[in-house]
Image: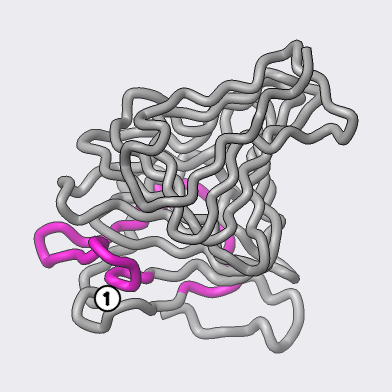
Amino acid sequence: MAAPSTFTAATDDDNNGYNSKFTLCSDVTSDTGTNDILRLLAHGTASYSFISNQNANVAARILFEGGDLRSIYNDATKFQVADGAKILLQSVDGNPIILRSYAYSRYSLFEGAGTLETAGDGDVVLLQHSYAPAKTVMFGAGEGGRIAWGNAGNFKLGGRMCLKLTSDDILPHGEGKGKVMIAVGEYSGTGTSESAPLVIDLNGTVNTVNAIAIGGNAYYSKWHVITSSSAFVATLGLDVYEDKALQKVR
């Protein structure tokens, strides 16, 4: 069947596609090998439950042109990718890839044997809105899946969340990649508190970063924790791919 039309979000409204379930089916064809399923214009938002690609021949692409994706509920893993398939999060003209959650319980970001890939010059920004309780985001690639960091910006975290790593070597690092940034308060509604800090839980994994930097609002940025909840030893390494990449982890 022919590729479906692109859903375009041009306004800041949580009702845009309210809690939609976007799926690229296995029988969709495309002359380019890519189907733009979502286009997020400046200040545009789209509310989603999950995004799924079941098609190994056509990549499902989301264009971030100044807007963001909003997860109002958390009844499903956010990105579901079948074996051989790909979901591509594309930063356009340096605009950030913003994934904002209002979730009230734990959720997973990615599952499946396919690939979740980022591209472009912008940051990847993962946010948990502060009016929702501090919640755990399971972050890893199981079942033979892969997260491919192709964007040139940073990986920013903001809000009352615990990012719990469930795979080794899942964080961006190396030449052409940015830093992991704790950026609480930089985006509206993403403040933290002493009782609800931003947490990176290494969870007994082995991971590497170019640097971990503190940014955002100075008042909120003091409330963050890097820890490991697992009984196994966790390792956080520094990727020194050239001399100028040797930065202080603080």
Q: Amino acid at mark 1?
A: Ser
- Can residue 220 be seen here? yes
The answer to whether residue 143 of the structure is visible from this angle is no
Q: Which residue is mark 1?
A: 221
- Mark 1 burial class by Cα count in 10 Å: few <14, some 14-19, many 20+: many
Q: Position of residue 73 (x, y in %)?
A: 29, 32
In-front residue for pair 250/115: 115
Q: Residue at x 58, y 58 (%)?
A: 65
**159 is higher (above) or lower (below) than 49:** below
Q: Residue at x 52, y 63 (%)?
A: 155
| Farthest residue, direction left | 195
Horizontal side of residue 236 vs 241, given as left or right: left
Q: Which residues are magenta?
A: 183-212
Q: Secondary structure at mark 1?
A: helix
Quadrant in which the C terminus appears: bottom left
Asked if the magenta segment contains residue 203, the reply would be: yes
- Left or right of 248, for residue 5: right
Q: Position of residue 52 (x, y in %)?
A: 57, 25
Q: In which image quadrant can residue 15 be found?
A: top left
Q: Nearer the viewer, residue 38 or 110?
A: 38
Above or below, comparing residue 172 to residue 102 in the picture: below
Instruction: Name the quarter where the N terminus is drawn.
Output: top right
Tell me where residue 132 appears, x and y as whole percent: 17, 46
> In terms of image quadrants, where is residue 121?
bottom right
